[in-house]
Structure formats: structure tokens, C-alpha cells
Amino acid sequence: MRGGGLLPVAGLLGVLAAGQWLLPAYHHANLVRIMVLALYATGYNIAFGYTGLLSLGHALFFAAGLYGASFAATLAGLPPGAALAAGTAAGGLAAAAVGVLALRTAGVAFMIVTLMFAQAGWLAILALGPWTRGDEGIVLPDAARALAGFDLSDDAVRYPLALALFAAGLLACLWLVRSRAGRVMVAMRENEERARMLGYDPFRVKLAALAISGTYAGAAGAAYALMFGYAGASLASVQYSILPLLWVLVGGAGTVAGPFVGCLLMFYLIDYASSLTSATLLLVGLALLVLVLFAPRGILGTLREKGVRWLP
Amino acid sequence: MLLALMEGLVSAAVLALTAVGLSLTFGVMRVVNVAHGEFFMLGAVLAWFVTQAFPGAPALGFALALVVCPLCVAAIAVLADLLVLKRLAYEPAPTIVATIGLLYVLQQAALSLFGPDARPVAPPFDFRVQLPWFGYSGYKLCVILAALALLGLVWALLSRTRIGLVMRATRIDREMARAFAINVDLVYAGVFGLGAGLAAVAAVLIVPIRQAHYLMGADPLLLSFIVVIIGGLGSLRGTLAAALLIGLMDGLLSTALFLPPTVARIAATLLVALVLVFRPQGLLGKAAA
Amino acid sequence: MAALTLLEARGLVCHFGGLRAVDGVDIDLAPDEVHALIGPNGAGKSTLVGLLAGRIAAQAGSIRLGGRDITRLPAHRRVRQGIAYTFQITQIFARLSVFDNMALAVQGGAARPGGRPALKREVAGALDRVGLADRAGEVAGTLSYGHQRLLEIALGLALRPRLLILDEPTQGLAAAEIAAFKRLVAGLPPRTAVLLIEHNMEVVMELAQRITVLNFGQVLASGPPAAIRADAAVQAAYLGG
């Protein structure tokens, strides 16, 4: 298997931990959001980067976590910890349910089937206006966001919490991809027919990978709802299926830290471009084109190919 | 009911054109072109500019737009292909990133130059056709006919000419085509341009009915993908059938089954998913595509 | 009887549209034999082994492995039951290391070693048997063609199968490599039976204890090499005199 990887990952997490005290308020707040979204991207990478499942339906799993946690907190009155768990489970279950049907297809058909399920979910959120309030969204009351006496709307509280979630997700991902199961996932990506003739059931392996990936998305969605106090239909739209794909591709598919790098870069790219010009997307688009020409395997993927072998 | 059918036919006709364009790039080049919807949008927006240049003569302006816009869009597409996609060797993952980048650039360009508002384009002529049951816009009928004519042209191009043969050969085996002295780079650039041009023609045709707007590309992109996959890759008849199905489905589900529109759309969306799950090769495609 | 027959297929049928690729084939394999499958191109050899391995579903007929009916078992379950299959066109994980390729095979087979040291030992042993022991760290796709073919066979062997199916294994190999291949295969029984599709008659005659000849999806003849060589029908259809 590829080198250790634990050291660079620990280093990244250490730097992020130091950020709690060192970062100026603006970037401190930004990183909370980036870490939650990077958790989402890390999960996407397990399905896409390692197992080769190009899903366009992850917004559904993200939304399952988002609304699962929101409803658990508001309608059922659960404490945030339980709401987070409920949202995480909702993401995993949604992914498993979609997987049972969608994994009968492969390639582009799989893309479209997952996309269709996610679109149906998004439309359902719009149709259930009385409960979800559609595009306008639900605002979670502060009472639902107090975790053991800590206020989740306070950056000093949610930064370490976001870091803890992201760290757990990143380390679990590292462990997974270095395990026997991770190797089998890669085998499915590389050559499914060969893997089948070595005794592995493609359907089971891919379903497990998708469910794990959906669990990550659910956890990220739930954390998003609880930390930012908002759940709206726009977070379930197709854009939120394409974003994790973009982050993973930019950072490097099939690298452990790539999704975080991609997420960080895209966030600050948009941030920086909008400070320069009102034509933000023009700059972002051009930057993507340049990036992809010079680093077609994503940043970490290309670096690793160029010989920086220790990158996780 | 019949009116819903006619509206559905108009949507289906335009969708079929857009989807055939996508099917070409997708089928021949194996490229997932996320920016295809933006080529559509660009066609509509350019049509507005062209017709604005001839305020007195809507018919002349429109006729000009019908020729100029697709050519401009095709030129942009060819440029994008040569400058970016070719250098990526059309590998799937980088190509997706690149076309997302292209999407951002085109969308922002339209927003900056055209503005955030939806703008109408006057139809080139305005008369009503009196059908036995009700009157109907003559222009919409012409859209259907024009789309059918263009589809016929594409079909003839693909199956009756040397260009079509070269394209099919490239599609089946890129390396083999190269060995037979086919300039694959040229074929790819041409196909990418043709695909974009078809989307632009479709947009010009529809823009007098629906207004031009810089965000109008998203729906055609999603719907074309669905149509291409449901219809089966490389099957022109399948694409046409799927476009009809998708174009008519929304309207029919809500009028025939008395479902509220959103529920009808949910049902239609799930139906598409289930068709693919149980017939992954598409409705008319051959197995093991 | 069970001890004498490892695999027993009866009345296998597989039609593609109008093409009768396999049309009512019976075949028996002993647990300790090398059995060759020969026949002209398009006779249905690859389809037949595809049916046995479970890559293609049989439209009629039955397959029993060690007395147990496996006709409806999916391919990956058959692998766990002890049927290993190597592809005619080399199918390895080209972007993974040779070690990772082998580890996947070792852990996919019926007998699974526990722990990392045991896995390493097992992989090293399997690579040693095909003479690739010093290549474990290399990326599989960078190996020479001959070595890739060997890796393909090693993957099958690492599954510790009861039956190893080889689809044209010597195609494209150099003479020296073919000699090494013959030694390797000859050493497999009695632990592993071999079903071999092969066009190189020299290899067939040297290795096989029994030969089955297919033609137009049906068994033309079956028996020991000497009998097959003398069979008039086979000569007419295949050996061509």
C-alpha cells in the first residue's frame, strides 16, 4: 500500500488546531465553513475518488443530513448531539436506499440516475413548503443550537467542533483507504470485472462505499444546519452535487487530503475574485481552466505523480 | 389537453435539437460537456443582440441570427476545444473541471455584457393557424417543422456523407481512425463545434417564445443529458423518442392524471430514474453500449 | 464417483440472438487433470468457460462443482467456491503495484490468511511460483507483456482454486516463456485441476491428459490426446489433415 500518510494528515490537523488561536476572526469564521464542507468533500472522495462512483446525487444525502438534523431539533425537540446523529444516519440511509437502485447501472447512467433521485428530493423539499418553507428555508432557533451549555452560533465554539468532526472524518478516511476494504474499493475503480473474478461482489462493495460516503454527507449537512442555523432548498439543488465533485477534482481525486485542499482553494478563489471584480465567475472559471491545464489530476494528485510520494 | 400536447411538442422539438448536439460530443468524443447548456444560452443571448441591430425588420434580423449565432457559438466551442480540451487528451475528470470552468466564464460573460434581466426577442412573423379546434401560433408550428428539418439534415450528414462516416469511425475506435489517416483532432473540434452550434440553433428558435436570460442554460443541460441517456447513446431515433417523452411528460402527467405540477415533476423525475435502472441501455439503444 | 469428478456440466446452452455459441454441451473435469479445450475460432470455447466461471448466465443446463449445484451462483461466489478464471486479454490492475494486485487475489480466495505478515508471506510465495518475486514493488502496468501474462496467471493461482480456467494463456509469449509456462501448469495437479483453452497444439499435446473438441457450439469429440489425434471427425473439422 501507499506510504504512511498519517504524519502529513496529523500535521494538517495540527495546523488547523492552531488556527483556533492564531487566525484573524474573518478567516477563523471562514474555516469553520470550509471544514464542514471539506467533510462533505472527503466523503464524496470515498465514493468517487477511491471507488470510481461518479454520483451527481450527493446533494440528496447532504440535504438528508441538513433536514434530518433540523427536524430532529425543531419538530422532535432533540438536543443538538442527537440531532447531529440523526442527520448523519439520515445521510447514510438515503445513500444506501439510492444505491440499491442506482448501482444496478454504471457510468453515465449512474450519474443520471443519482441526479434524478436528488432532483426528486429537491422538488419534494420545495413541494413540502409548509414544513421546509422551500427556498426561504428553516431558521433554527438558538435554543436548538446550544450544545451542553455551549452556543453553536459562537465561532469560538463551533471552530473546535467543526475541526473535531473534520478530523474524525479525515482519520477515518485514511484508515479506510489503507485497509483491506479500501484496497477492494480501489480494485472496483480500476477494473470491476477483474475484481469480480477475484471473488469480490461489486454490488456489495460499491453499496458500502456509497453508504459510507452518504454518511459523511449526512454528518456535514447536519453540522451545517446546527452550526449555521439554516436549512434551505438551495442547499439540496444540483449545484450542491457538483460542488463536492469540483472540490475533489481540484484537490486531487483519490488523495486523502485533496478534498480539503480543493475546498479551501475554491473558497478563497471565489473570495479573492469577488474582492477584485464584480465578474467573479469569470476569474474563477479562468482559474479553473488554467489549473486543469497544469494540474490535470488535481493539486495533490499531480504533486504525487510528480514524485512527492509522501502526500496522503 | 390538446394545447398541452402542442406546447409539449414545441419543447420536445427544441430539446431534441439540443440533445442531438450533446449526443454528438458525448457519443463521438466521450466528453461530458457541462457547458453545453451555456452554448444554448449563448445562442439565445446572441440572437437578442443580432435582432436589436435591425429594429425595423424583425424577420431579417431573425433570419440573420439563425445563421450568425450558431456559427459564433460553434467558433467559440472549437476554440475551447483546441485551446483546452485537446491538451487534456479528453480525459474524463479534467474535462469535467474544464467545462465547469468554461460554464463559469460564459455565464459571467453573458451576465456582464447582457445584464441580469430576461429580454424578449420578437418573432419574425406573427400569424395564427386556425386548427379545427382552436387557433394556434403559426410561429410555434414553424419551430417544430424547422427542428424536424434540421434533425433530418443531421441524420443525412451522419449516415449519408463521408463526414458522418469519419465521425462514426472515430467514435468506434480513436486509434484505428488515426491509423486510417483521419485527422482525429479536426474531427473532434468539428464535432464539438457542431454540437454547440445545434444547441445554439435550438436556442435561437425558442427565444421568441421564451425570453433570453443568462441563467437559461441549466434546464436544457439537464434535460439533454436525460434525453441522451434515455434514448440510448448514438441512436438518433432514440434521442428523438426520448425528447418527445420528456417534452410531453410534464404536461401530460399533470393534465392526464390531474396531479399538481410539482408532484407531476417529481413523478416524471423518478420515472426517468427507474427507466434507467431497469433499462440501462436506454429505450431504443442496443445492449452493452 | 464424487471423488473422480470435480466439475460436471450437463446440457449447457447459450445463444446470442440467432448464434448458437454453446448448444447443449456436457463436460466433466477430474480433480487432478489438465483438460484442454480446442476447436476452430468461433466454436464457443470462450463462451463455454464463461458459462463455467459464471461470467455469462446459462440459458439451460446445470453445473455442479464437487457435487454441489452452482448453476445459479454469481461469478464472485463461484470464485470463493474454488473456480479461478484468467482472462484471454490480460486484465490486471494496471495502475496498482504487483503486490497490491496479488494481495487482492490472496484475500479474495477461499482461504484467507490473517494479519499482514501472513499476507506478505502468501503474496511472496505466489509470486515466487511464477518467477515474479523480485517485481512486487513495481506498478503492474509497467511490466513487460510476458510478465503481465504471468501476473494474470499468478492472480488466478493466488486464489488457491480447485479449478483454474486459462483462456489462451500462451498467446503472444516467447518460446522460453512458453516453456516456463508448461512447467508451471504441469506442476499444478493434483491440488488444482486446469481447464485450458489453447491454440498451440504442442502445448496441448504435452500438457493435457484429456482433450475436448468443440465445433459450432457442440462437443465434437472428447478423450485422451492420442484418441483425439486419431479421430477422423476432428481431423476433418480442425486439424485439417
Image (cartoon, rainbow, N blue to C red):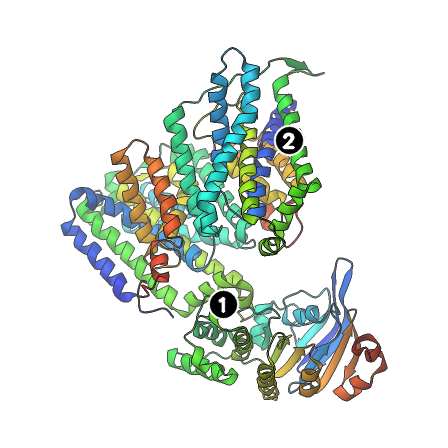
Mark identifier at residue C93:
1
Q: Which residue is mark 2?
A: B150
Callout 1 secondary element: loop
x and y, in percent, of residue B102 in the image = 42, 39
Q: Determine contact: label 1, label 2, CB under 8 Å.
A: no
**Mark 1, chain letter?**
C
Of residues A137 and B196, which is closer to you in this image? B196
Residue at position x 29%, y 42% in the image: A269
Residue at position x 65%, y 67% in the image: C72
Residue A108 shows up from this direction: yes
Q: Quadrant of residue A181?
A: bottom left
Circle nearer the viewer, 1 or 2: 2
Disc 2 crowd rating (10 Å Cα; few below 14, some 14-19, many 20+) is some
Callout 2 secondary element: helix
Q: Give the amino acid type for the residue marked by disc 2 in the picture.
A: Leu
Q: Quadrant of residue A273?
A: top left
Q: Is residue B244 above or below residue B24?
A: above
Residue found farthest to the top: B56
Of residues A168 and B215, which is closer to you in this image? B215
x and y, in percent, of residue C195 in the image = 66, 79
Q: Quadrant of residue A4?
A: bottom left
Image quarter hosting the C terminus of chain A: bottom left
Q: Is residue B6 above or below residue A158?
A: above
| B1 left or right of C115 in image | right
x and y, in percent, of residue C140 in the image = 47, 71
Of residues A228 and B245, which is closer to you in this image? B245
Q: Give the amino acid type for the residue marked by disc 1 in the picture.
A: Phe
| C212 left or right of C177 in image | right
**Mark 2, chain letter?**
B
